[in-house]
Amino acid sequence: MNIPNLLIVAGTGTKAGKTTFACKLIEQFKNLGITAIKITPHFHETTPGLVPISEKSGYAIYEENNSKTFKDTSRMLNAGATKVYFAKVWDDRLWEVFIEIMKEVPAEIPVICESPALRNFVEPGLFVIITSNVIQKQKDISHLTALPHVIFKLEDLEKHDKLPIVFENGKWSYKG
């Protein structure tokens, strides 16, 4: 399925800079009413500010309402996202959960989603892989490296005020 208003962010490891990249992009385009989504296969304990939307066997979807913590979803909200969703989901329910979240998002709204596994199901307007010199735990995303539209190194992104990405005519694209 092709979703041009979707930008997917993946990383080569823990602390690669996925959320830092997403927040920088949200700040750059916050005037567009961006929706941000973080999807994880890890079932962490929920924290204050996460309002349940749907909880079923194999997944839970929340809307983030607290911009005052250091959680990734709070950082996205604080960066200027109009709406932020967080989902804990088993891999076999990922597509179902993504579709459920997207029902909450108007079609013309730009969406930034931190979920490498989602790339297995959808062709986004832009797929970005973030790498860094300070990765704490390397992830094997070799099956995805043939699919990216662009790879950024976190340390290089920090040198630029604006990212070379645009959202035009309902589609994310790279202008580098």
Image (cartoon, grey):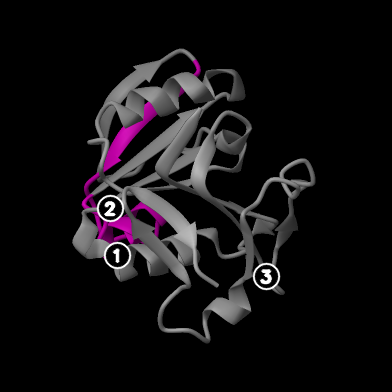
Dot 1 crowding, Cα within 10 Å, few <14, some 14–19, many 20+: some
Q: Position of residue 130 (x, y in %)?
A: 62, 62
Is residue 91 positioned above or below 68 on the image?
above
Secondary element under disc 1, as helix, strand or loop, is loop
Residue that label 2 marks: 34
Question: CB of mark 1 within 8 Å of CB of mark 2?
Answer: yes
Q: Quadrant of residue 108?
A: top left
Is residue 163 positioned above or below 1 on the image?
below
Secondary element under disc 2, as helix, strand or loop, is loop
Q: Quadrant of residue 136?
A: bottom right
Q: Is residue 73 magenta?
A: yes
Q: CA distance from mark 3 to mark 2?
A: 25 Å
Name the N-terminal-most of marks 1 and 2.
1
Foreground mark, 1 or 3, reads: 1
Question: CB of mark 1 within 8 Å of CB of mark 3?
Answer: no
Q: Is residue 98 magenta?
A: no
The kind of residue tagged 3 is Ser
The kind of residue tagged 2 is Ile
Name the N-terminal-most of marks 1 and 3.
1
Residue furthest out toward the front: 169
Residue furthest out toward the bottom: 159
Residue that label 1 marks: 29
Residue that label 3 marks: 132
Q: Which residues are magenta?
A: 58-82
